[in-house]
Image (tube, grey):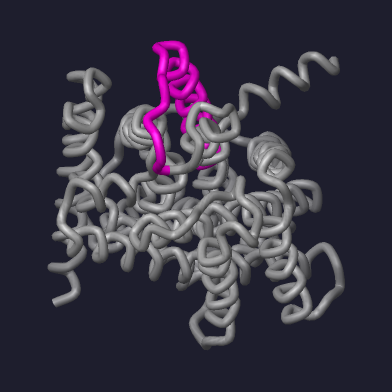
Amino acid sequence: MTNLIARIKKAIGPGVITGIADDDPSGIATYAQTGAMFGFAQLWLAIFSYPFMLAIQEMCGRIGTVTGTGLAGIIKKYYSPRILFGAVALLAITNIINIGADLGAMASATQLIIPVNFTVALLTLTIITILTEVFVPYKTYVAILKYLALTVFSYVIAAFAIHQDWSKIFHMAIVPHMIWSRDYILNVTAMLGTTISPYLFFWQADEEVEEELLNKKIRAMGKGVPKVSNGDLTQMRTDTAIGMFFSNLVTFFIIVTTASTLGAHGLTSITSAAQVAEALRPFAGDFAALLFTFGILGTGLLAVPVLAGSAAYAISEMFNWEEGLSKKFSQARAFYLVIILSTLIGLIVNMTSIPPITMLYYAAILNGLLAPPLMILILLISNNKNILGSRTNGKLGNILGITITIIMSLLTLYFLYSLF
């Protein structure tokens, strides 16, 4: 049993952590809203998005693995400073909104388990997040993230704790259903935006570099080109495929759970991610509600550091600051200050009058708007032999990458058109 646990821990790498971080409270709220508003009608997106998500994240992982440099560092070296600044600025703004919404959702979820004031819960979670990311050694910190990744299984268990019409579920999952309405298409944008998210692009590329630094393949992030074997790339791809599979599996079961409970009873006016858990109680029972609440806390504790960390990596690479979670605070002060400030500003976002679910939902839409231009850059980089040598994209990767970029670009144009 001990050997099995050790193997599982070793198999969980940057790809799995990235995939699970995708199911943050913002994602949970979007998937719950999807199930509540549209029932099983958008369940097919959980399966449809998997190969596209995998293709883009594999490119990001390969860029970091082959170059020993994060995504922002590569953009800075080979592309216009304006492109770099625009990408990093939008990433930072979107991430801060996401952090704020996630912290608020986690604090509300804590209140369902422990009788504590919202502000006290919010401050406590913020302090815990900052202290662990800044002061816990990288090797230990990654182990913590791996354990937190296991919390996503609570959503799978919750779905099976409720009576389900599985024949209908599998039919709706396999056969795409389109409704040509503004709300339906807007929600598709939010679904894809929270599934194929910009912060995941930057995080995975940089975490692959962190792993190389841990394994002494490079002396510092962005300094030196690592020797990469086919085995290294195979391991990265396997890790990424598993991570994205679990990410979409959780998406699938959250929609199933909320569609068969909230959606079936017409409860579409959700104001917070924690309210989703509480609303499940009359229809799914205390056990399912508790599992859903536990999932919000666990994935939030995993996702908030990823959001803050991805912004810190990007900004540090833009200004040539020392970076990396493997460094101590004294060695990379600016990098860690970005993490601290991003989290604290996210905390302040909760002091506004905007409902948490609205922040979460529109954070997902913002991710959907930012993703297409970044995916174009990722496609250009991952096809550039001057950057990746012989490790450029294959035909299938390009087909999947170009297809999802076109789809999300069209959705972005539709969203902008719908504003007028």
Of residues 95 and 314, the one nearer the viewer is 314
* Residue 7 shows in this picture: yes
Q: Which quarter of the rendered picture does the C terminus lie within?
A: bottom left
Q: Position of residue 321 (x, y in %)?
A: 44, 60
Q: Which residues are magenta?
A: 222-251
Q: Magenta segment: does it hold 258?
A: no
| Left or right for 310, reference 297 | left
Drawn side of residue 249 relative to residue 277, left or right: left
Horizontal and vertical percent for residue 279?
66, 62
Residue found 66% across the figure and 23% down from its top: 10
Q: Main secondary structure of the magenta part?
A: helix
Q: How many marks?
A: 0
The one nearer the camera, 70 or 253, is 70
**Where does the image place residue 85, in percent across and percent down from the top left?**
26, 65
Q: Is residue 231 left or right of residue 330?
A: left
Find residue 300 and report its image quarter. Answer: bottom right
The quadrant of the picture occupied by the N terminus is top right
Image location of residue 39, percent across then percent down: 45, 49
| Vertical order, 180 against 108 (above or below) | above
Magenta highlight on residue 247: yes
Residue occupying the point 41% across, 14% down = 229
Q: Give 420 or 56, whichever is nearer the viewer.
A: 56
Q: Residue at x 76, y 65 (%)?
A: 110
What's the residue at 66%, 59% (across, down)?
Answer: 134
Query: In the rendered image, is residue 57 in sight?
Result: no
Please state which of residues 46 and 103 is positioned toward the viewer in this rendering.
103
227 w.r.t. 147: above or below: above
